């Protein structure tokens, strides 16, 4: 029985950009980034590998398009945020919501953060998300430089955290090798502070860890770049 992404037997394969992207994402979810090759993608679509280059000149072009597709959910959240920003409100809540949406978008696909981190997507989804993020801060009175640097800071934190989170989740499938190795290393050494905090260091509450770091960033933005109080 053929997979949902495979063309029906006896019919010519229908090749288009949207179907190619969806098949690539399906393969990513099934086997991970390391197993995703242009040849395997072509086989899944029932075409010759050269046919894919009509839409994607290189594998890197394909990965960039995949990153853009992944961020569609975050872009939807950004559109909602942009509409809400026009009405004012708490900038920090909107910023936090955007960061959460970006993390969720990357977590929705196996190795999603690895794919995104290696690309420089400039499609509507990525740029729409970035524009909404910067817009929240500029509307709140932050300077242009501060708003742009805050964007990089939050995105880099979100991608980096999700990279580690997805790697740890995959390691858990191998009997929690990472956490076990850390426990063993700390237990045989003289690390009193690490020993005291080991439960937190080996916790699998990735959402709690993400929220803690995000709160630190937002708190720092509020302390360093908050707009001055209005005078009479």
Image: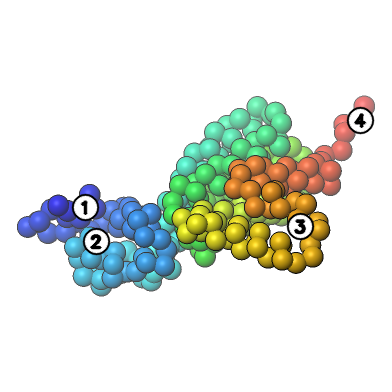
**Coordinates of residue 73 in the picture (x, y in percent):** 47, 42
* SS for dot 2: helix
Q: Tell me if 150 is positioned left or right of 67 in this view.
A: right
| Of 220 and 87, the residue lying toward us | 220
Q: Position of residue 32 (x, y in %)?
A: 40, 61
Q: CB atoms at circles 1 and 2 under 8 Å apart?
A: yes
Kindly report which numbered mark, 2 or 3, lies closer to the viewer in this rendering.
3
**Which residue bears the numbered disc 1?**
3
Mark found first going from the N terminus, 2 or 4: 2
Disc on the earlier residue, 1 or 2 = 1
Gap between marks 4 and 3 measured at Cα? 48 Å
Q: Nearer the viewer, mark 2 or mark 4?
A: 2
Q: Mark 2 or mark 3, which has the lower sequence index?
A: 2
| Apparent side of residue 64 relative to residue 200 in the rendered image (left or right) | left
Q: Which mark is residue 44?
A: 2
How is this picture coloured?
Answer: rainbow
Q: CA distance from mark 1 to mark 2?
A: 8 Å
Q: Crowding at label 4, few (<14), some or many (≥20) Cα neighbours within 10 Å?
A: few
Q: Circle 4 is placed at which residue position?
A: 231
Q: CA distance from mark 2 to mark 3?
A: 48 Å
For the residues labelled 1 and 4, the Cα–Cα distance comes to 65 Å
Which mark, by number, is residue 194? Answer: 3
Q: Quadrant of residue 221?
A: top right
Q: Quadrant of residue 23?
A: bottom left
Image point 46% across, 55% down: which residue?
A: 173
**Pointer 4 or 3: first along the chain:** 3
């Amino acid at each position: 029985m053929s997979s949902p992404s495979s063309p029906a037997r006896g019919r010519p394969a229908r090749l288009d950009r949207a179907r190619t992207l969806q098949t690539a994402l399906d393969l990513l979810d099934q086997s991970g980034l390391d197993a995703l090759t242009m040849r395997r993608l072509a086989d899944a679509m029932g075409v010759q590998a050269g046919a894919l280059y009509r839409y994607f000149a290189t594998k890197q072009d394909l990965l960039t398009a995949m990153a853009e597709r992944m961020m569609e959910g975050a872009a939807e959240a950004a559109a909602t945020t942009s509409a809400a920003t026009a009405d004012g409100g708490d900038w920090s809540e909107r910023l936090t919501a955007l960061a959460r949406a970006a993390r969720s978008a990357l977590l929705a696909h196996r190795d999603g953060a690895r794919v995104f981190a290696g690309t420089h997507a400039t499609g509507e989804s990525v740029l729409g998300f970035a524009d909404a993020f910067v817009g929240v801060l500029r509307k709140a009175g932050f300077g242009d430089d501060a708003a742009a640097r805050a964007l990089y800071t939050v995105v880099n934190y979100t991608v980096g955290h999700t990279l580690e989170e997805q790697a740890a989740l995959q390691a858990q499938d191998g009997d929690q090798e990472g956490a076990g190795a850390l426990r063993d290393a700390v237990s045989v050494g003289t690390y009193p502070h690490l020993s005291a905090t080991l439960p937190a260091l080996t916790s699998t509450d990735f959402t709690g860890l993400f929220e803690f770091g995000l709160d630190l960033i937002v708190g720092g933005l509020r302390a360093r770049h908050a707009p001055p109080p209005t005078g009479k």
